[in-house]
């Protein structure tokens, strides 16, 4: 008896590392110390000394059951972008710059080429957010997970000067709310998505083309989460102070928007201020999902909302456009009970 006969292939693990090295190398920053394969990832904090009062920010998350679609479609090179996005967007929401990311892949069986494809997506997410991929772990779980299954999660660490943190403390009635378009469902609500499209959750079903989507169902649902790090950095470099920021993830508008508010302020969002992507209309109709539940579960086409002074709205939107995002003025801040109103 040996480890391989017990279900864990150490040689496959070595091969996975070799295959992923080319992707990891692309994410390196000058602060990274050492290479892939050490017991820990090392990152120099020398540059942080230039800040008056540096604050470390962290975020950890996974892709939820969206991973199941990647498994069914046998397409694994974008799900890693989702894992990175869910972490770095939260850091950017607080005004931080993501520094580095580490991933964790649990699998029933280590197929080196598949693992390398997953990490390729992770590396792409790191490139989009300018974070270094400084380490990770691939763990085989024979007997615990089916051989073809895997799960992906990770965490990121970022930094900002305390004076530049986005905390909502300066919010005032009249401030403008700007939403940046999402790429679709992103990485939240997929347990409901899979239930609605239960009969379509096959390789053939997901390959079906929908005229209203302009793509196959699988392509639409698997579209990776947008990463807004560069857009928020562009806004900051334009001299605009973001007063508050909300990453629209699980819980949709009703749970996430209030998290950006201070007591005595209320967000009022106009549902007709932007075009809701077709996938959400299809979900609502096919699943007979009430509108309130849709806005309480999904991002409904807006992945990030920021609040700025009215005088800064035009400059903020121009900076977002320059960074490749699509911004909309979606509402404003009013005096009132802390919460969100959709009208």
Image (cartoon, rainbow, N blue to C red):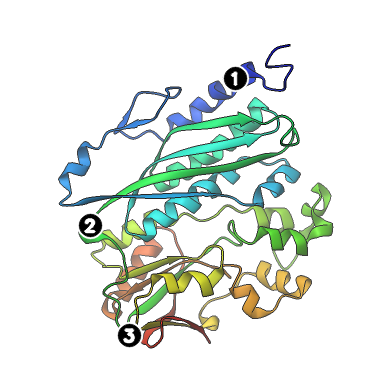
**In front here: 206 or 17?**
17
Q: Residue 280 vs residue 236: left or right? A: right
- The residue to which callout 2 is attached is 162
- The residue to which callout 3 is attached is 174
Q: Quadrant of residue 115?
A: top right
Q: Position of residue 46 (x, y in %)?
A: 21, 36
Task: Determine the CA span between mark 2 and mark 3.
Answer: 25 Å
- The residue to which callout 1 is attached is 15
Task: Determine the CA span between mark 1 and mark 3.
Answer: 57 Å
Q: Position of residue 320 (x, y in %)?
A: 38, 64
Viewer can see residue 210: no
Element at badge 2? helix
**In front here: 23 or 197?**
197
Q: Which mark is residue 285?
A: none
- Point out the tag, 2 or 3, that comes first from the N-terminus: 2
Task: Determine the CA span between mark 2 and mark 1.
Answer: 43 Å
> 229 above or below 151?
below
Crowding at mark 3 (Cα within 10 Å: few <14, some 14-19, many 20+) = some
Q: Quadrant of residue 190?
A: bottom right
Crowding at mark 2 (Cα within 10 Å: few <14, some 14-19, many 20+) = some
Please report contact status of discs 1 and 3: CB closer than 8 Å, yes or no.
no
Q: Quadrant of the N terminus?
A: top right
- Point out the tag, 2 or 1, that comes first from the N-terminus: 1
Viewer can see residue 108: yes
Please report contact status of discs 2 and 3: CB closer than 8 Å, yes or no.
no
Q: Residue at x 68, y 27 (%)?
A: 111
Q: Residue 326 vs residue 144: left or right? A: left
Element at badge 3? loop
Residue most extreme to the top: 1
């Amino acid at each position: 008896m040996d480890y391989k006969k017990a279900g864990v292939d150490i040689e496959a693990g070595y091969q996975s590392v070799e295959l992923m090295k080319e992707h990891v190398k692309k994410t390196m920053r000058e602060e990274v110390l050492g290479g892939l394969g050490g017991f820990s990832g090392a990152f120099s904090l020398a540059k942080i000394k230039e800040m008056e009062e540096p604050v470390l920010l962290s975020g950890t998350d996974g892709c939820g059951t969206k991973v199941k679609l990647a498994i069914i479609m046998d397409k694994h090179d974008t799900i890693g972008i989702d894992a990175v996005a869910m972490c770095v967007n939260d850091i950017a929401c607080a005004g931080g710059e993501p520094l580095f990311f580490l991933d964790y892949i649990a699998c029933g069986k280590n197929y080196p080429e598949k693992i390398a494809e997953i990490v390729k997506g992770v590396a792409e997410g790191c490139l989009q957010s300018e974070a270094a991929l400084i380490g990770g772990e691939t763990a085989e779980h024979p007997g615990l997970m089916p051989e073809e299954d895997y799960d992906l999660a990770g965490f990121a660490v970022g930094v900002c000067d305390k004076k530049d943190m986005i905390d909502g403390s300066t919010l005032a009635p009249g401030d403008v709310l700007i939403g940046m378009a999402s790429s679709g469902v992103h990485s939240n609500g997929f347990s409901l998505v899979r239930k609605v499209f239960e009969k379509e959750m096959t390789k053939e079903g997901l390959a079906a083309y929908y005229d209203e989507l302009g793509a196959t169902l699988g392509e639409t649902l698997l579209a990776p989460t947008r990463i807004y790090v560069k857009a928020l950095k562009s806004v900051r470099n334009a001299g605009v102070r973001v007063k508050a920021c909300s990453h629209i993830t699980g819980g949709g508008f009703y749970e996430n928007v209030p998290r950006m508010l201070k007591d005595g302020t209320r967000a009022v969002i106009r549902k007709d201020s932007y075009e809701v992507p077709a996938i959400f209309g299809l979900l609502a109709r096919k699943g007979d999902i009430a509108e309130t539940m849709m806005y309480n579960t999904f991002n409904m086409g807006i992945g990030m909302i920021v609040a700025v002074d009215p005088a800064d709205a035009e400059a903020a939107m121009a900076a977002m456009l320059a960074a490749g995002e699509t911004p909309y003025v979606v509402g404003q801040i009013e005096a009132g009970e802390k919460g969100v109103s959709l009208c």
